[in-house]
Image (tube, rainbow, N blue to C red):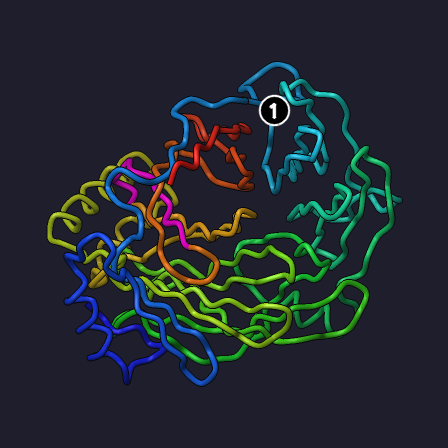
Amino acid sequence: MRCPSYRATCCTFVLAVATACGDAAPGKPTYTAYDSAGIQVVVSQLPAWGAEDGWQVAAEPALHIGAVDGDSVYLFERIAGLTRLSDGRITVLDAGASQLRWYDPSGRFTMATGRSGGGPGEFRYRPTGLVRGGGDTLTVSVLGNWEAVNFTADGEYAGTSVLARGRQAEVLDSLFGCPRSMGPLPDRTVLACVSRGRVRNHHADVHRGSHWLIRMPLDVAWTDTIGTYFGFSTGAWFGAPATAVAAGGDPLTVFVGDPAFFEIAAFTDGAERDRLMAYPAGLRAVEPADVDAYEVFLRQWAAERPEGSYAADLMDRPAAPHMPGFTSLHYDPEGYVWAVAFTPAYEESHRAWIFSVDGPLQGSVALPPDFEIHQIGSDYLLGIWRDDMDVEHVRMYALERDG
């Protein structure tokens, strides 16, 4: 086990606790919590849920929107965001069409708004994210010109907010590799990255450049820095994904996770980090069988895509000692954070780790294959499902919380 970097000096202590609790009996602690310079650190060794506990996601979707041909309102070019409104309607941001579309609770198309252009309610560049605010207001981020376009729940244009202008926009436009766009946060701030230059290694052969993760309010200048973001590692097989981000709650909490070390930092109501959750046992070691299976996958990939494939280059890289712990984070308004587990390309399993927002690991949930979470409700998951041709569809699955 590799010691988490946030507290290298306590490595021996953490390892001792993990060993002692590895076969914990019911009622025994499954995590260790301590204070480190005013930050609450929670290190989980085992899930809190027992073998008979946990949650279930339905095998079949309760709602499906999308097609591979036919009416264009059911064809998606690139979904950049989607949300379920309080009345059950589904709003989808199709970035390829530069359009917001509304569907009723049964999945029937009802209306659309937005298009490419410079007029009111139009997008000068391809939109990159969607967030639902109070009263089901909708904000679409357009990072090509650092604007956010606002709409009511019924599609009426409600004004445009400026994220950055002048030198700020020039700095932001020069950056790349930030966490996958979330759109503005629920409190109408947006996350951006500013180059820092520091490096955090996944291991000796992998280098990951870093950036400050900046939180900016709409129509206002620079604001608080909420931590460091680390980019993708590209020097080895099973390299670490970039920083994952989720946000939600009241007061708003931003969760910033580093998959390479299975660490998730929480920043509540401001720039100060107030807690850190970690699950080092979730870092699966890379075994020889993994390397063999991945090589088979890469060779097949190169054979199917001889032009433009960089599989041969990947095969020359060393294998990382362990796989990343997760690839993305999602806020659950019931008081949890979901960390979608990393799945190698040659495997079909798809799971998410569930943490309570105060830190301890609760357990894991099996997810539908080829499904990407966008919104978690009290009894559903809403997201993007990709078919065998990689065509995007919108799906909603029932969620049973029995744990």
Q: Is residue 380 above or below residue 246?
A: above
Instruction: Tell me what residue is drawn at x 48 percent, y 82 percent.
Output: 38
Taking depth in this image into account, of 300 and 350 the one nearest to the observer is 350
Viewport quadrant of the N terminus: bottom left
Task: Specify the farthest residue to the left.
Answer: 288
Label 1: how many residues lie within 10 Å, few (<14), some (14-19) or many (20+)?
Answer: some
Q: Is residue 86 above or below residue 4?
A: above
Residue 389: % across, % down:
43, 26
**Camera-nearest residue between 380 and 246:** 380
The image shows residue 371, relative to residue 227, as above or below, that is above
Residue 343 x %, y %: 31, 45
Which residues make up the magenta segment? 344-355
x and y percent of residue 220 in the render? 80, 70
The reply, left or right, for residue 9 in relation to residue 401 is: left
Residue at image location 29% in from the left, 48% down from the top: 311
Q: Quadrant of residue 78?
A: top right
At label 1, the amino acid type is Leu
**Quarter of the figure with the C terminus:** top left
Q: Position of residue 49 (x, y in %)?
A: 30, 47
Q: Residue furthest front?
A: 27
* Residue at 48 percent of width and 58 percent of height: 357
Question: Element at badge 1?
Answer: loop
Question: Residue 272's image quarter?
Answer: bottom right
Q: Which residue is mark 1?
A: 75
Assess whether residue 349 is covered by the magenta stretch: yes
Decide if residue 182 is in sight here.
yes
